[in-house]
Image (spheres, rainbow, N blue to C red):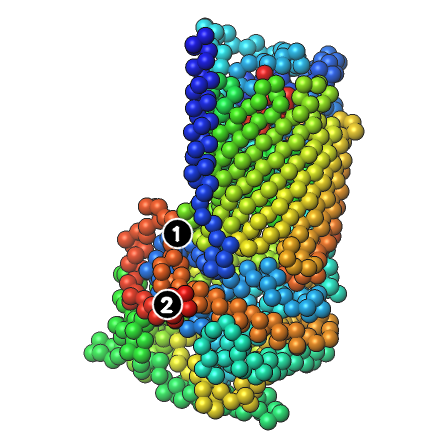
Amino acid sequence: MEEDRSPLRRALFVQLLVAAAVAALGCAETGDSRAAFVRTQIARADQSLIRQRRDLVAGKYARMARTLYDYYRGSVPVFAADFANGAEAASATTARSAPLVLTTGDAHPENFGLLLGADGVLALEPNDFDSADQYPFTWDLRRLATGLVLGVRRSAGEAPTGEAHASDALTDAVVRTMVANYVQAVAAHADGAPRRRFEREFVFALAGQNGGSLAIFEDLFSRGDRDVLGRRAIRNATELTPEGRRILRGVDPEDPEHLYQDLPPSTFAELPATLAAYRRTLLDPPEVAYFTVLDAARELGSGVASWPRIRAQVLLRGPTDGDQDDVLVEVKELTDSAALGWLLPQRYYGSVGERILSTSRALWAVPSAERLWGVSSWVGLPVQLRLEEDGQKTIRTRRFEGDRAEPAALEALARVLGQLLARMHATPPDLQRAGDGQNAAAAIRDAVDVPDFDADEARFAIAYAGRVESDFLLWQRLVVSGEALELPSAEEDRASAAQRALFGTPAPPLLPELPERPDDR
Amino acid sequence: MIANRPIWLLLLTLPMAVAPRALAQTEATELLPAEAAEQELAVDEAPGDPAPGSDDASGSDDASGSDGRSESDEVIAPRDAAPHSEAHVPSATRVPTDPTPPPESPEPAEPGNELEWLVGMETFGVYRLRRTLNGEDRETGHVFDLERTMLWAGARYGDLDARVMVEAVPSGDEAGLLAIGGDSLVLRMREAWAGYTIADWVRVEGGMIQTLTQPLVESVERLRPIGKGPHERFNLLFPADVGASATLLMPGGYGRVSAAVYNGESYRSRELNRGKTTELFAELRPLAGLSWGRPLVVAGSYILGSQGAGSARADRITGLLAWDSPRLRVGGTFTYALGFDDNGARKGWVLHGFARVEPFAGLILAARAFHFERDVDGSDDSLTTFEGSVGYRFVDPFEIYATVERDVAGDRTEVALPGSDLWEFSITMRVSLGDPRIRSPRLMSAEELTP
């Protein structure tokens, strides 16, 4: 009898043990706060990087915690989750239809800038294709509209408080101007208007309509011309030595987090193969000798979302052996886009590189808008290569000051970017990957033919900008407390010695000072 | 299909070659009395050569295994005995085609203490033709896809058993950085667990284990070949996770009570927080004492969960009421979700109904409908799905389904998820080879659990 009861006792003991364990483990604290949501979205997107390149991610997060606009640039995963959740959705009439279009996926103002074409002409184009893919047209429209609101508020010197802003009337006007121009241009493209290149004269003509100020674009183009002519990138980033030109190492005097270091020899040795494959992706490639490597350096502390990605500057021989025409190119690691694959077949490109090449050439007015923009792979990583040219100026919201912060200048900016976004979305059917070979512009024109479309979009942008501002304050606290980087890890997550050498040693992150909260007192 | 029959017969022999003991045991134990009698007749009439479409190949009534289960999961003997032997024919009468006499063992092994190996695979190949209705915009897409491909290998020794299961998945899924280029299909671990049964009424498991609620829902409705059910489709419940569980089996086959603790990120992701997810589960067969009433199943579970680096709340309350017999499966579930999609403040619910009928051997008629309220605090944020399907089992491991699906999205949902309002027609081919019987008894039916 005793023998029969022994297994039962054993089983009962196990059950009790399990109940105790469940009770203990089940009491884990959970969060339903916005901070938990923000932290989770960003950590999910970066989890492999946090585990393997923690120091680099720390730099990215610190940068995102320093300014509101940098937070916006780095928080695409939060925007994607909010979009899928329908957060701050505008009225149903706005987006009852949202056809997918080929686009950059992150069309905020600082992802537009000048590109130096094969013909030597500077033109305003999208200049970041890291997330380019097929998206609902409202996705990009709202990224741009929200970015404009944040830029306008930055121009007014407003601190992010999450409260009502004095400049709401201006932001409303700016967003409405952008949307109205977008709608107007989409309709024109649907009727067959050509996809024009946004050269200086065309941009100035657009910006100057309705009494608009040219201040932002005059600043952009004049600085671009100056730096192209002066070969500023080569002058500032390299030095001439008796052995020839080389890239300067060390800290950028203007940005203590931006620095250049030696590449590991094995990584340097891979560059010729990388460049040979890259050359084959160019539309009109220079001769092979053009790509002879003179020097290369690991670049750290550049970008926001791409901060932890491997980035390097490579100095090439250029057209001749002389040191006056050496060429600097940037090599940047690529990753998957943020697109969620809404329609079959859900993935439209065989590789990351193919996605970058296809989308950039389709979205630019001319495929050779930047003649050295290509892709390759480097030490097993998919990479993008582009001309490093200081004349290729990017629109920067921090420069919205003085006459560039005037309402007439900001509305002119909105007018131009609205028209440029429309041109991007009006990609010809033969370049589209999704849909039935339809006219994308016509589909959007039909979709936006609803009452108060511009008002709805402005309402969304202002509401979502408020959300971004309050998220930014939460994010600052997550970064300063170290919670943003907390993730269970294991020994096998540690990078190998070779990987660590490639990752480099970033400067210590500069953490922001937290604003005092009422409950801190 | 007749032309293809030799191929499938060949495929049929594969698991028999790998695990002859297991297959023989399956066949010996999986039949209900009436079916066993039919099988005996069939064997007498056409030994070893079942007609296409007949039920003879296995005697199984069901088509769809969930989580790697073949239809033979429906009624499978417990590890070490033939507790409902009166309901089953001896294995000798079920395997008349094998002319090789069973090898004589020098010493009869002690029952239940022999090492058994069981391997198998299941795959769904799908062709989809989808028409999305995005407002005035219409788009058509079609694609061939591998909806599911799983391989498993299990072993059992006495009271101890274990299984490893892998599944195919696109490498680009989640943090695919430095993974295989493009979106290659790669294998990832879905299950890897060991289990131990104590005194025949308590069982513990650890490792990457099956969860409790989702496998039950799938195994009762058996509609996985026509598409994911709502819980898996909307990431409300997951079929497996890393953790441990304990199950208390009620006497008389009246059900089971289980508790489990997991990481909470499912088998698709590593742990992202310090919190753990707890699942409390009960499955009752209230009419188990009546032979006709055994298929009635009532189940309920509560999941106290956390997800993501921010430990966002992810609690679930689920109830199930169903009739779970081989030829008729009908029922429904309701799940209330407190926190999902990494948003702890979000609340939603799913109401789900299904029916699956086999009016005669081989023919499968199925219907499923569910409504997902994505945000109880918002308006027009919902998705309603209707599915109808006709399937046919040509031979036991091979079925084909033709399915029509209509998804109706609320206005707000359509904004958030373009392409969610759609019509879809799909053809699914399901092949299942081998016997995934090495598994937790909590997945066994009332028949199996009857002492």
Name the residue tied to disc 1: A487
- Looking at the rendered structure, the kind of residue marked 1 is Leu
Q: Which mark is residue B362?
A: none
Q: Nearer the viewer, residue B71 or B220?
A: B220
Labels 2, 1: one chain? yes
Image x and y of residue B274, in percent: 41, 47
Question: What residue do we see at 55% from left, 90% from top?
Answer: A408
Q: Is residue B68 above or below residue B266?
A: above
Q: Is residue B339 above or below residue B354?
A: below
Q: Is residue B210 above or below residue A65?
A: above
Q: In terms of secondary structure, where does tag 2 sit? A: loop
Task: Please identify the quarter of the rendering in which residue B360 is found.
Answer: top right
Task: Please identify the quarter of the rendering in which residue A455 is found.
Answer: bottom right
Q: Chain of mark 2?
A: A
Q: Chain of mark 1?
A: A
Q: Earlier in the sequence, mark 2 or mark 1?
A: 1
Name the residue tied to disc 2: A521
Q: Residues within 10 Å of mark 2 (few under 14, many from 20)?
A: few
